[in-house]
Image: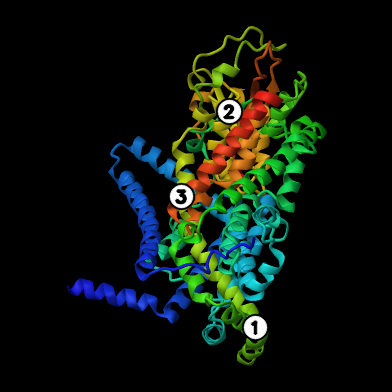
């Protein structure tokens, strides 16, 4: 049974497209409103002590926000450049050749795709979006999106550096593949127009002719004839095109990264960590506490193993899985990035499904294998 | 009506490919320059661990490279032959404002590392750390006691290596008057000072906490470590002030952590690298 490209059947109208643009705009407006509110709050505080307190909190917010942004920006840019290169050098024919058609194998291939495109949770989003634009089957993209932040050489090495060979390393890798595979498989049942957002569907509809013959002609044009024609325009235009697309992707995804970093920094500034940590000892509650912490902290998956190490003596092993498996899949920052690909309802499922699956695995580990 | 038509005109101008291209180029270069200023001013360490500074350098190069790719001839090539590949994203006002936010905050908010305000909702590990970072522990064991940082001491205590009476500590950190400082100051026992009664409030009982943030990745994962210091003029020390403390530790009784009895407390300027790295 062959996979249907998520975009070939897509149909949309202008209303949906403009609704998508409005949705994106609303995020920006919401973020600006929060900042304006903060500015008003600062100016309306009367006593010098209160003013000092608010100003100091704002300073902390800015430092954490810029810390998150500066740390994540290189990874997002790397992901965007990979995305631009895919856009120019990879075509649907190649994907169809290498991605298995059988749903189980396709979801499994998606979970292992991180070895081909080693990206963290910031970089994986533009790459996934670009691959969807190239006709990647829906479950493969979902499994890739959720697994790639962990199932790649860089993150596996950093987890090894922090925890060595042991249950934490193997559990992290194994459970990430399992959860990504399961969620990917669930999404095999969904139709692309139910899952992907309007602008992406529109792009897919524009890019892809409906008949196989017409599609083949476009593929031929892009893979063989077009490069020669373009070479007359500029000595090496393809790489410049890839970079220009990388810039577009970076700026587009950067909006979500910045909005997510604002949220994560605001939570870090306002929600006391001790409130979470004080209740983190039980086999069940500890799992949810570290999952919540992973979601809020939004630390890059390439280094989160070192953060998890900070909790290794105080928290159960199962809860570490909550942090190391769920955190890279979904956090405040990446949830907002997901909106660049998926509909809001899908993003909700993409948070809920990994949350439920990881929680079950982690609690099972604590209860059956031992904390 | 006039306002509406003006808005329409502005929005139309924003939609022009040439304007979009120029704005995107400006934003990409702007972000690159912003990151560059953090490196040249030496304030990058306020935000991320120094071991990731090379990534920022790569990001700057990448941003300049990508920003430079928005060229008229490249745009022409897109329009002519790459319709199947490229659909340029429209960057609206809200998107522009969001992307420009790091630049704006970087321009208008003076760069400062995390300080006492960040401790309000963070755990401070005084004399114990729920983290055992092998490299840091090894380095702590290898160092002379007078060269150990607050993190080295805290990790050593965590490993059960109590200080000898002859060990001199020489540490730098910022002052924090914690109400919890007295919890770590339970009846210390030393050759010089027996039977010191635990005070009830740090700021009023000659006790303060010398603190540093430990950063693994970026400011978002900063974790505070501290040592309880006994110093007669502790209440007069201003919070957030950076100080150098030289002294000796008391020998702990039971589970209580050693207290650093200061012989000298000098105010010092904020170090270039305010955080410690595991």
Which quarter of the rendered picture does the C terminus of chain A lie within?
top right
The secondary element bearing badge 3 is classed as helix
Residue position marked by numbered label 3 in the rendering: A262
Nearest the viewer among A243 and B57 is A243
Residue drawn at x 68%, y 27% as measured from the top left: A313
* B95 shown above or below A300: below
* B72 shown above or below A94: below
Residue position marked by numbered label 2 in the rendering: A286
Residue drawn at x 70%, y 12% as measured from the top left: B190
Examine the image and state in which quarter residue A247 appears.
Answer: bottom right
The image shows residue A165 at horizontal and vertical percentages of 80, 38
Number of numbered discs on residues: 3
Nearest the viewer among B113 and B28 is B28
The image shows residue A64 at horizontal and vertical percentages of 52, 46
Residue position marked by numbered label 1 in the rendering: A220
The secondary element bearing badge 1 is classed as helix
Front tag of 2 and 1: 1
């Amino acid at each position: 049974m062959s996979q249907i490209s998520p975009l070939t059947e897509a149909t949309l109208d202008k209303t949906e497209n403009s609704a998508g643009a409005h949705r994106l705009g609303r995020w920006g407006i919401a973020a600006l409103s929060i900042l304006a509110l903060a500015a008003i709050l600062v100016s309306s505080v009367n006593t010098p002590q209160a003013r000092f307190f608010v100003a100091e909190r704002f300073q902390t917010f800015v430092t954490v926000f810029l810390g998150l942004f500066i740390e994540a920006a290189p990874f997002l840019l790397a992901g965007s450049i990979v995305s631009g290169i895919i856009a120019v050098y990879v075509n649907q024919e190649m994907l169809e050749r290498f991605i298995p058609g059988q749903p189980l194998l396709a979801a499994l291939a998606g979970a292992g795709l991180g070895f081909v495109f080693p990206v963290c949770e910031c970089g994986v989003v533009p790459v996934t979006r670009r691959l969807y634009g190239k006709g990647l089957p829906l479950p493969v993209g979902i499994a890739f999106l959720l697994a790639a932040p962990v199932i790649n050489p860089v993150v596996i090495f950093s987890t090894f550096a922090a925890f060595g060979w042991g249950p934490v390393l193997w559990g992290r890798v194994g459970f990430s593949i399992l959860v990504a595979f399961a969620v990917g498989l669930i999404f095999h049942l969904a139709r692309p127009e139910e899952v992907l957002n309007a602008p992406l569907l529109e792009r897919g509809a524009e890019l892809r002719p409906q008949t196989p013959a017409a599609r083949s002609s476009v593929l031929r044009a892009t893979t063989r004839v077009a490069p020669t024609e373009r070479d007359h325009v500029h000595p090496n235009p393809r790489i410049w095109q890839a970079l220009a697309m990388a810039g577009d992707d970076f700026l587009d995804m950067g909006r979500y990264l910045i909005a997510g970093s604002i949220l994560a920094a605001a939570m870090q500034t306002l929600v006391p960590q001790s409130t979470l940590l004080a209740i983190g000892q039980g086999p069940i509650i500890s799992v949810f506490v570290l999952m919540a912490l992973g979601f809020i902290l939004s630390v890059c998956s390439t280094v989160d193993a070192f953060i998890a190490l900070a909790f290794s003596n105080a928290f159960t092993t199962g809860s570490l899985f909550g942090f190391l498996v769920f955190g890279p899949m979904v956090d405040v920052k990446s949830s907002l990035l997901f909106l660049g690909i998926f509909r809001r309802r899908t993003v909700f499922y993409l948070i809920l499904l990994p949350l439920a699956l990881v929680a079950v695995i982690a609690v099972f580990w604590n209860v059956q294998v031992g904390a | 009506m006039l306002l509406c038509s003006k808005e329409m005109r502005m929005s139309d101008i924003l939609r022009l490919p040439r304007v979009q291209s120029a704005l995107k180029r400006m934003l990409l270069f702007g972000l690159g320059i912003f990151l560059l200023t953090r490196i040249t001013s030496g304030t990058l360490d306020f935000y991320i661990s120094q071991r990731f500074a090379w990534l920022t350098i790569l990001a700057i190069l990448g941003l300049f490279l990508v920003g430079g790719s928005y060229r008229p001839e490249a745009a022409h090539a897109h329009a002519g032959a790459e319709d199947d590949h490229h659909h340029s994203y429209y960057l609206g006002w809200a998107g522009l404002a969001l992307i420009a936010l790091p630049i704006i905050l970087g321009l208008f908010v003076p760069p400062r590392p995390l300080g006492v305000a960040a401790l309000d909702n963070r755990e401070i590990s005084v004399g114990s750390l729920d983290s055992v970072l092998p490299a840091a522990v090894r380095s702590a064991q290898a160092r002379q006691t007078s060269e150990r940082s607050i993190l080295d001491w805290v990790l050593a205590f965590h490993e059960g290596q109590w200080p000898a009476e002859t060990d001199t500590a020489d540490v730098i950190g910022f002052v924090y008057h914690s109400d919890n400082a007295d919890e770590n100051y339970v009846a210390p026992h030393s050759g010089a000072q027996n039977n010191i009664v635990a005070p009830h409030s740090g700021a009023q009982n000659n006790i303060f906490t010398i603190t540093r943030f430990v950063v693994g990745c970026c400011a978002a994962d900063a974790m505070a470590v501290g040592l309880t210091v006994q110093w007669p003029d502790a209440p007069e020390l201003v919070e957030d002030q950076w100080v150098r403390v030289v002294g000796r530790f008391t020998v702990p009784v039971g589970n209580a952590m050693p207290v650093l009895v200061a012989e000298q407390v000098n105010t010092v300027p904020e170090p270039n690298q305010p955080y410690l790295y595991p």
